[in-house]
Amino acid sequence: MSFESIYPEVRALVDGLWDHPELGYREERTSRAVEEFLHRHGDGLRVERFSTTGLKVALPSAAGASPAVPGGDPAAAPRRRIAVVAELDAVISPAHPDADPTTGAVHACGHHTQVGIALAAFAHLVATGAWKQADVDLTFVFVPAEEFVDLARRAELREDGTITWFGGKPEAMMLGVFDDVDAAVCLHAIGGLQEEPTIEIDCDLAGFLYKTVEFEGVASHAGLDPFSGTNAYAMATLFTTALGLGRQQLREDVLVRMNPVIPSTEMTTNVVPHRAVVGTDVRSIDLDYLGEVASRVDRAAHGCAAALGGTAHVRTEMGYLPFVQDRTMSGAFREAFAEDPTITRLIEDRGAIAAAGDAGDLSFMMPTVQLSYGGFDGTIHGRDFRMVDPEHVLIAVPRLLVAALLRLGSHLPEPLPRRTYAEYVETIAAIAPVPEGAAPAAAAGDAPSPAAPGAPVPTSPSEGR
């Protein structure tokens, strides 16, 4: 099966996802479409479900000589299993003309094309039997809820026990979805019109916390007796101003970002508002400094409330960890690019950007890379984002992905580093409160695992990409 021959089916599926965007942990239609495709092209492979809408399918091991196979060569090196990870959810960007009028959801993140690329690669590998020539074993994982949005709904799902983590990859990590995986390949679109067919590797991402600050004042009649009131909205305004003024004291080299927002409220003009809520991310590529900035944000909230006679209640939710890509694994993509005549530009190691994603959490546990790709115009998450070169995105990129996967075994770091989910929870707990039920049961004899190269380990305490 050629990528050109599967293209019409993949393109129709991707267009359908664009027309029906769904938010994290609600991707029911998306999940059904993916599962149906996997069954059509999976040659009887078992498709596992996890969390609310997540899907996982593992190709068999082709390790006839592996010591793990009965009768195999005990001297043969054990094979590694690599996960190709794609994301199911949309982002909230109601200004986009194609956004869902009810939810504001739209695939201005490009996740719908991640799904298409992964499915095209899966179908090709199964139909051609190419997976048998790979020097690694392969698994495809479709995860929900990468975008850190729709948080009130996710809080409800947490409250009723449906989920534990707001992010889909941490949730999958907790559920053991990646327990049999040694390394991961993630995918992501590049915003902005590229002048030629383009891919990118080795772009690191920031980590972030999410803070909700509730300012509490005293209500009174705004016309008759404003003197008896304490204006919570004024506290919120002072707080957002303080964050802006405080930027002068923040380091520039670690990409600190904050974007405070004040959600719509039930305020009326004839009542001094007694309550106002501000939500803000706090992000940086440096995990230690992230904790320091988070403490400054807390002090600003309490100080601004006290200055106007009110109080502030601060809640902190862990977002995602910084993502440091594994440069050893990237070698497989460089080789595949060098052999591909249709993709003519490689953006390589431009450093870190302040976007974030839960690929950072996965990279804490195992070596992880992200293959990014052009073929779009407009700004990621913006009102003008759209796919303009579908043949590049859905034919050339899956072809390059497969070429890299087939040789990835010789580009894995040795020794292969691995951390446990328990170590992940311990790291998060040093930065922010850990959700109830997230901590694993202690196991006797557990020993620390070798640290993943470049993965952050703290010594002190919106959204996907």
Image (tube, rainbow, N blue to C red):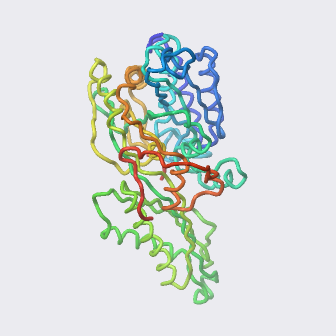
Res 295 visible? yes
Nearer to me, 348 or 266 = 348
Residue 21 place in picture, x, y as percent: 57, 37
Q: Is residue 299 above or below residue 127?
A: below
- Where's residue 270, x and y in %? 62, 77
* Horizontal relation, residue 102 to residue 462: left or right: right
Determine whether 406 is above or below 203 in the image: above
Q: Residue at x 60, y 73 (%)?
A: 275
Q: Quadrant of residue 71?
A: top right
Residue 111: % across, % down: 49, 36
Q: Is residue 71 above or below residue 409?
A: above
Image quadrant of residue 156?
Answer: bottom right
Left of 420 or right of it: where is 395?
Answer: left
| Numbered label tally | 0
- Residue at screen point 71% across, 50% down: 161
Answer with the quarter of the image where residue 333 lies.
top left
On the question of residue 238 being in view, the answer is no
- Above or below, 46 relative to 102: above
- Given residues 445 and 104, the one toward you in this image is 445
Residue at the farthest right position: 160
Judging depth in this view, the residue of 154 and 450 nearest the camera is 450
The residue furthest front is 74
At horizontal 41% and vertical 46% (from top left) the residue drawn is 451
* Residue 410 spot, x, y in % from top left: 35, 25
